[in-house]
Amino acid sequence: MSSNLIDGKEISTSIKNNLKLEIDEIKNNFSRSPHLVVVLVGSNPASLSYVKAKEKACKLVGINCHVERLEETVSEENLITYIEKLNQDDQVDGMIVQLPLPKNLDKEKIIQKISPYKDVDGLNNENLGLLASGDPRFVPATPLGVQRMINEIGIKTEGLKIVIIGRSKLVGIPLALLLSSKSDQGNSTVTICHSKSKDIKSNTLDSDIIIVATGFPHTLTKDMVRKNSVVIDVGVNRIEDNSKKNGFRLIGDSDFHEIKEIASKITPVPGGVGPMTIAMLLENVTKAFHININKRL
Ligand code: NAP
């Protein structure tokens, strides 16, 4: 890769290799692997491909991943009953309800039914509260991956100015909490921008690190980036491309090709934050295994 690209694939491969060793040891000591259940409702094509990637990564490190596919028409009551069954099952360490859910299902209500001890996506309010109070249990994988990536490329965040564009519960908010936390990998001054923010450019031009997570291409343009800042692009957008076999290609939320000429470091899409997210999910599942085992010792 060109020298200022942050290679999320390479960083995540080394994390997965270490994790595989840890899981081999778990298998020797406990005669079973960490067990993840992914609940997939319907057949959204993007969800299908994300779930496939998760299954593949689990297999690689030795995590037992079961995908439970439910009909698009499943009722909220039946889905919640199934989640509660998994909550009670001692052999299940972690669980994910793949998002988005069909519109007739109340996403927030359903997510909050997942036991906070099995919530490897870190979306349960109890886990968000623990993160906010400085005692995290499960943190969503994407913010964890961004923080780890910044650390792995040797950037010390202490005292730096970081702007995050996007304030979702999945990305922006937990990431702001992580990067401003009193910790070696935190201690930065974080500004959060969102769709109602005025003059985002003045914030990005004043920042050492710019993280963009809006879900809209071209949110971050070249004129918003000062020379030598670091740009982390979380966005994943499908753009029609007839030259590709599947008819689309993925791009981020930033104008990558122009910005890479001025940023000191930048993540590509794909191959940047995506692989880190998967690696952090695998770490969360392994953590869930230890929590589950320790509960019963
Ligand atoms: P989301 O829930 O839709 O949140 C988007 C956030 O961006 C909101 O806070 C919104 O502001 C803000 N926003 C939208 N347009 C904006 C604009 N023009 N200027 C400033 N702020 C703007 O999305 P998400 O779940 O956080 O995901 C964001 C992106 O990251 C998506 O492309 C998603 O696919 C991607 N993603 C990637 C990974 C990965 O592993 N690579 C993982 C998760 C998500 P308001 O709050 O005011 O609406």
Image (tube, helix red, strand yellow):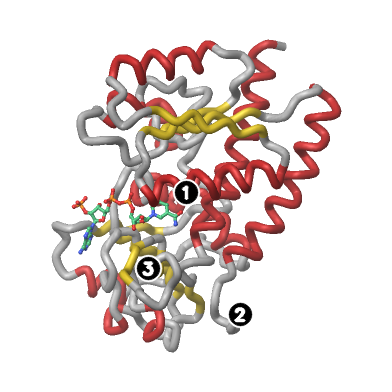
Mark 1 and mark 2 lie on one chain; the one further toward the N terminus is 2
**Vertical comparison of 26 with 89: above or below:** below
Q: Which circle's residue, 1 or 3, is located before the other in the chain? A: 1
The answer for how far apart the CA atoms under marks 3 and 2 are is: 25 Å
Give percent across and percent down for residue 15.
68, 53
Residue closest to the eye, 15 or 186: 15
Check disc 3: other Cα within 10 Å, few if <14, some if 14-19, many if 20+. Answer: few
Given residues 291 and 186, the one toward you in this image is: 291
Circle 1: residue type: Tyr
Q: Amino acid under label 3?
A: Gly
Residue position for label 3: 247
Question: Mark 2 sits on what residue?
Answer: 1
> Residue 2, position in %: x, y?
58, 84
> In screen coordinates, is 205 left or right of 124?
left
Q: Is residue 161 visible?
A: no
Q: Name the residue tied to disc 1.
A: 50
- Which numbered disc, 3 or 2, marks the residue that appears first in the sequence? 2
Label 1 neighbour load within 10 Å: few <14, some 14-19, many 20+ = some
